[in-house]
Image: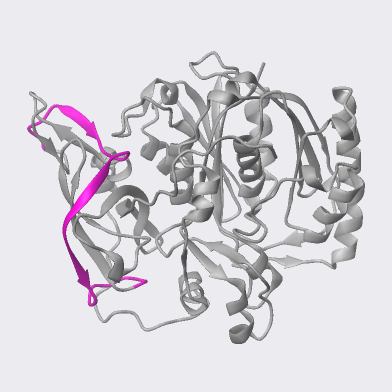
Amino acid sequence: MRGILGWGVHLPYRRLDRTAIAPVAGAGGGTGTRAVASYDEDTTTMAVAAARAALHREGESSRGDRGRLADTIRTLWLTTTAPAYQDRTNATALHAALRLPRTTAAYDATGAVRSTTAALDAALTGTGTHLVVASDLRTGRPGSADESAGGDAAAGLLVGDGTDGAPVLAELLAHTSTTEEFLDRWRTPGDQTSKTWEDRFGETRYATLATEAWDAVLAADGKVSDDIDILLVAGTHERAVKSVLKKTGVSAARHHDPFTRTVGNSGAAHPALLLASALEVAQPGQTIVLLVLADGADAFLWRTTEALAFYRPARPVADQLAESGSVSYGRYLAWRGFLAVEPPRRPEPARTSAAAAARAAEWKFALVGSESADGATVHLPPSSFDTAPHPAAGSEGTIVTFTVDRLAYSPSPPVVFAVVDFDGGGRLPIELTDVDAEEVAIGMRVEATFRRLSSADGVHNYFWKARPVRRTGGRTERESC
């Protein structure tokens, strides 16, 4: 039996009110909000957050030690349409941040929304344990439908047969696929935004392909439409998704998508995001179909197991939907590079040294400090006199003092810098993110988060920052979809 062993989701803290778009751009917008990755987030940093959540298990060290489960991962997949790098593997940074064994292979599957279903299929048809992390930044021209309907997010799915210490939570019953060459959406290398063909053409092609995949996946396990408890349909063609939902014959009450008015369509991340969200509200023994429309159609049929009743996600989707702060449309345009703003009059950062980064990889990518031989003292960053590692990436801490710097270079000033005492030991001066300067206070609780400090000469400088700990009531009980 192969299926889903765990999942993790990352929704950026910032949300853009769609009603703010039209007064500036003259078109576009709508109702609700869309998720916006911060200036220091990209598909790699969001993937790290989602993957760490997918590997979390209750009872593990809060310091973020990787645990035995991570050591069993055979392959790590990172899927996206917006990779931080080309001509190099982005998944290696994710591999380093998770402290995976050197024997764990790390691969990218990039360029198309369908990359996620390809990686998921490879994980499900393989052997051993695999981690598929889908992360995407969705950007459209100002005032476009892509801009308002899109959303930034990441989701990780841990796939295996339950023999490596984690039970199967959702068993795969069948997977069917249909493919046809037709022009619906495209973006040439170097372009920031996509182009689309006329809507009716794409709707017609997807309706045919999706119907074939839908009928085949039901027939593969002897199911009919009324047997499906939760239906998920992912695709960037909005009209096609609505049309296919009707053609399945599954009642609207069983359709699941809490993201349309809150987060938006997250492209390559959306299939994994929908599945993770559905599993959080599903009951054991329910049947779920994930139907993905992207250059063809893929249908995955799942059945949840009894083990699902005992699984608690690290950061539930409902909590992350409730934990949000606003961002102005002007700042969003600046973050995306559509609005050139005057930077602080300070020297821009220099290119990061490859040699220096390699020497300090455990500290730089995984926030691993050190402990003295007797365990009484923790050093962040690590001390050459210590011999024991001290993983701090999963730790929370308390701000003991802070400063707001309005002169230092930043793509989104001001810079808020704090001195944090981490639980379990260690004091570290660290930049804050996902926070407004006026809300910072001594005594505030924060947690570490993997971010991009700067980019120079095409080289991204990744390290850890801290963000406020925001809780909206803790774990949520399972409820009927």
Count of numbered badges drawn on the protein: 0
Question: In the picture shown, does residue 409 fall above or below 372?
Answer: below
Side of 294 where 419 appears, left or right: left
Which quadrant of the structure image shows residue 256? top right
Query: Where in the figure is residue 3, as x and y percent of width and height?
Result: 64, 24
Q: Which residue is drawn at the image coordinates 71% and 25% (left, top)?
A: 172
Q: Which residue is drawn at the image coordinates 80% and 53% (left, top)?
A: 241
In magenta stretch: residue 189? no
Side of 54 where 358 appears, left or right: left
Side of 219 where 165 appears, left or right: left
Q: Is residue 315 visible?
A: yes
Q: How is the image coloured?
A: one colour
Question: In the picture shown, does residue 334 fall above or below 212?
Answer: below
Query: Where in the figure is residue 276, as x and y percent of width and height?
Result: 60, 39
Q: In the rendered image, which quarter contains the C terminus? A: top right
Which quadrant of the structure image shows residue 429? bottom left
> Which residue range is magenta in the image?
383-412
Q: In the rendered image, which quarter contains the N terminus? A: top right
Which quadrant of the structure image shows residue 461? bottom left
Q: Is residue 11 visible?
A: no
Query: Where in the figure is residue 31, as x and y percent of width and height?
Result: 66, 71
Question: In the picture shown, does residue 414 fall above or below 208?
Answer: below
Q: Furthest-top residue in view?
A: 163
Query: Where in the figure is residue 351, as x and y percent of width and height?
Result: 30, 61
Q: Nearer the viewer, residue 102 or 273?
A: 273
Q: Nearer the viewer, residue 116 or 54?
A: 54
Q: Nearer the viewer, residue 367 or 118?
A: 367
Q: Which residue is drawn at the image coordinates 17% and 49% (left, top)?
A: 428
